[in-house]
Image (tube, grey):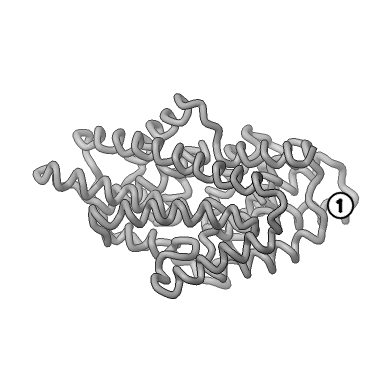
Amino acid sequence: GIPRVMAALNGEVPPAPLRVIPVKFLAGTLAIGSGLALGREGPTVQMGASIAYQIGKLFRQGWEDCRALLAAGAGAGFAVAFNAPIAGAVFVFEGLIKRFEARAAIAVLAACAAATWLGRAIFGDAPEYSVGPLTNPGLLKAPFFVLLGIAAGLAGTLYNRTLLAALRTTDRFPGLPVELRAGMVGAAVGAIAWFAPSLVGGGDGLAQQALSGVGTLVVLPIVFLFRLGLIACSVAAGTPGGLLVPFLALGAELGLWFGLLCALAFPGMALEPQGFAVVGMAALFTAIVRAPLTAIVLVAEMTANVTMLLPMIVACSAAMLVPTLFGDMSILDSLKERLLARSK
């Protein structure tokens, strides 16, 4: 969904046709509802972009206006998926267009606000995640968050490479029907859900557990690696769904594990592992998507917590550095390049 919108905004592919809206809605609902480790933001971003673009065409607007509406619809889809209107607008300029455009800003801001207002009217205005009171970390604790950012950068590189490797593996079996591939993945997810239902799905429950401090030094790495493999398999199934929601849970688990480790190693520092979980969400998002401003605003809006803003800035800076040194592209750019290569 999102890589296709990126390519359409750059004029590299035509915008998706009108029929993609019911297809994404139904298929995305079935895929996410069945327990695949996918997020809701992928389909909502593409559906929002397609609806806005079709409205522009209906009123016979030129490409520049239709492009602005395309960006606005994408931002609205992102905003309502995460209940985060500011992050939705920032994501459009930092993650999709990759520059600020005044023409698009008017439409994007209005669309994100309207979509979030309507979403809150239906689902309520409570934040996505509940976080207890946190103490503002002092300057002496900054090195811990730098190290967390480095760890998130390494984990983000692993995440991106794992997903792309899973997709390349499916490409090696062109004769395998996509229905059979999806059925095999679905059967595996169903078996997992039978014995451990909390481990399947987008991961919202796992993220909330980590933000509440639930987890141990032994269990958290196991869950992290298991979920990483499950996300890769879910993507390889070829069904509609987003990648962003699942790795928010991974980031929270990584942050909590790192916080517990630091609290054990330095008991006199009064470290709060839950604060590390909040920062870990933003840091891993940054490492995977290379959109630090979006990550910081998104986590602040989803948790209704601004206490950890400075640690998030420090950690996101370090998380941005690691994959840059490795020369890795963001996962969205990598998937866009894959889309363009397959469309030729």
The residue located at (44%, 61%) in the rendering is: 203
Q: Is residue 78 left or right of residue 315?
A: right
Q: Alpha-carbon neighbours of circle 1 within 10 Å: few (<14), some, or many (≥20)?
A: some
Residue designated by label 1:
57
Percent x, y of residue 255: 32, 48
Q: Residue furthest bottom?
A: 194
SS for callout 1? helix
Q: Nearer the viewer, residue 5 or 187?
A: 187
Is residue 114 at least partly visible in the picture?
Answer: no
Q: Residue furthest left?
A: 268
Q: Is residue 278 left or right of residue 324?
A: left
Q: Is residue 153 above or below residue 167?
A: above
Is residue 54 at least partly visible in the picture?
Answer: yes
Q: Is residue 150 left or right of residue 108?
A: left
Q: Which amino acid does the dot numbered 1 rest on?
A: Lys
Q: Is residue 318 above or below residue 61?
A: above
**In which image quadrant can residue 122 be found?**
bottom right
Percent x, y of residue 309: 36, 43
Q: Is residue 316 above or below residue 50?
A: above
Where the C terminus falls, by quadrant?
top right
**In which image quadrant can residue 318 be found?**
top left
The residue located at (19%, 34%) in the rendering is: 140
Percent x, y of residue 129: 40, 61
Percent x, y of residue 134: 26, 53
The residue located at (35%, 57%) in the rendering is: 223
